[in-house]
Amino acid sequence: MSVILSDISKSYDRVSALDRISFSAESGELFGVIGPDGAGKSTLFRIIASLLVPDKGTCRVSGYDVVTGYREIRRMIGYMPGRFSLYMDLTVEENLAFYARVFGTTIRANFDLVREVYSQIEPFRKRLAGKLSGGMKQKLALSCALIHRPRLLILDEPTTGVDAVSRREFWELLGRIRQEGITILVSTPYMDEAVLCDRVAMIHRGNLLDITAPEELKEYNYPLYSLRSKRGAYAYLDKIRNLEGCRSAWLFGDELHVTISSTDEVEGICREVSRWADASLVWKPIPAGIEDRFIELMQ
Ligand code: ADP
């Protein structure tokens, strides 16, 4: 089931949340969307799920327009919003039965699809959803999004706030759901998850920066170093930016990430940094993360 967006824009009052976004996700693809908070990921997913009308542009899901064909679309998709979509005062079992009934089906009819994920929470089926751990809520929400056997699954940051083991298990499950031929759109702030997708769209402030294969996400064409100091990395920011061979330097939390123009410049910059170094300064090469890639794309 394909998703095709052409020139989609959406504003809330004066805030432009999406600015002329175009891309398509192929049928059966595991398509990732990454971007920092406020990038527009949830707005994008709500439009694709036909829950929000775009100001401009068109979005087609399996050939149906999200505005005129919303009835057909809603029957075919499973949507797991960022905040859990569960009824906290219903039990595990009641939540699942409710979602099945809304779509005119039963737990039994589609149990094979949810068996693997649901079996992990089934021992707690009489427990109120509000009393589950984060990882269990996530599994129940996924079961509820799957119980009507959707052809497109839309998952908005499904692993945010979930522990590392549950995150890994969740992605293993996604791989298996995809083998059922279900197209998956998923947003994530995590690099290690983004690389598990077939393709990844990077968005920032409502703009599509790039669509890449996951291997390319790991590539970074410049040497990258981090600098930490008890004096505060910020104290070094201007000095480093003014060094010849410094391509960019940004504060990431309490450390600086410094991109060097070429390997030939590394030695000179390291020498300069060691000349200023206070005793607590730590300067070392690091692998690039999603944020570094974003900053590079925005240069
Ligand atoms: P993300 O999911 O990437 O964090 P969102 O789509 O939630 O991004 O938000 C995109 C932008 O739109 C942000 O600047 C956000 O503050 C704004 N925004 C989102 N929802 C609303 C709303 N209901 N009213 C006003 N502004 C909103």
Image (cartoon, grey):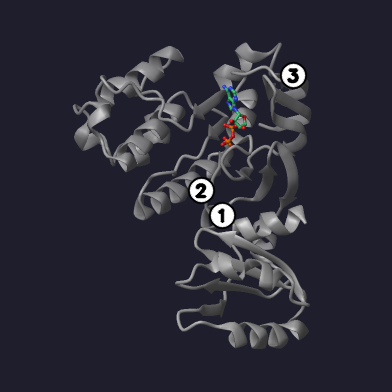
Q: CA distance from mark 1 to mark 2?
A: 9 Å
Q: Earlier in the sequence, mark 1 or mark 2?
A: 2
Amino acid tagged 1: Leu
Relative to 154, does residue 289 appear above or below in the rendering? below
Left or right: where 195 falls relative to 3: left
- Name which residue lies at 61% across and 36% down: 41
Q: Nearer the viewer, residue 279 or 5?
A: 279
Secondary structure of residue under mark 2: helix
Relative to 30, does residue 264 appear above or below in the rendering? below
Q: Nearer the viewer, residue 216 or 151?
A: 216
Instruction: Give the image quarter of residue 191.
Output: bottom right
Question: In the picture, which quadrant includes the C terminus?
Answer: bottom right
Left or right: where 99 falls relative to 123: right
Q: Please tell me how crowded label 1 is: few (under 14), some (14-19), or many (20+) other residues with Cα within 10 Å.
A: some
- Name which residue lies at 57% across and 64% down: 234
Secondary structure of residue under mark 3: loop
- Name which residue lies at 51% across and 27% down: 78
Q: Which residue corresponds to mark 3? A: 55
Amino acid tagged 2: Gly
Q: Which residue corresponds to mark 2? A: 175
